[in-house]
Amino acid sequence: MPNLGPTELFIVLIIVVLLFGVGRVSRIGGELGSAVANFRKGLQEGAKAKPEDNNPSNPIEENA
């Protein structure tokens, strides 16, 4: 797979804008940014959870 330099990325960006339009591309970018922010927030909330909440007991291991 070829490496993409700045020139190639710029050409791809121009083609995407021509195909989808500026409004749609900016909306997709905003939605992608909010999705990443929510993902990071979820990771931080998961790290704050108690360890016993993240490791439920397995009844199979208890009977063995």
Image (spheres, rainbow, N blue to C red):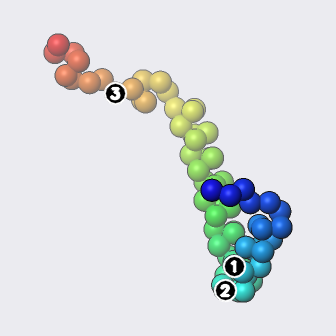
Query: Could you say which disc has been placed on residue 56 in the image?
Result: 3
Mark 2 neighbour class, 10 Å CA radius: few under 14, some 14 to 19, many 20 or more: few
Return the disc, 2 or 3, that comes first in the chain's sequence: 2
On the rendered structure, is 57 left or right of 41?
left
Residue 5, given in percent of the width and then of the height, sits at 80, 60
Q: Which residue is mark 1?
A: 16
In the displayed structure, 39 sits above or below 53; it is: below
Residue type marked 3? Pro
* Residue 6 lies in quadrant: bottom right
* Residue 60 lies in quadrant: top left
In the displayed structure, 9 sits above or below 26; it is: above
Secondary structure under the numbered disc 2 in the rendered image? helix
Cβ atoms under marks 2 and 1 closer than 8 Å? yes
Viewer-proximal residue among 22 and 51 = 22
Residue drawn at (53%, 37%) of the image = 46
Residue drawn at (60%, 59%) of the image = 35
Secondary structure under the numbered disc 1 in the rendered image? helix
Residue 42, given in percent of the width and then of the height, sits at 56, 46
In the displayed structure, 10 sits above or below 18; it is: above
Q: Which residue is mark 2?
A: 19
Residue that sits furthest to the top in the current view? 64
What is the CA distance from the residue labelled 2 to the residue labelled 3? 49 Å
Give the quarter of the figure containing the C terminus.
top left
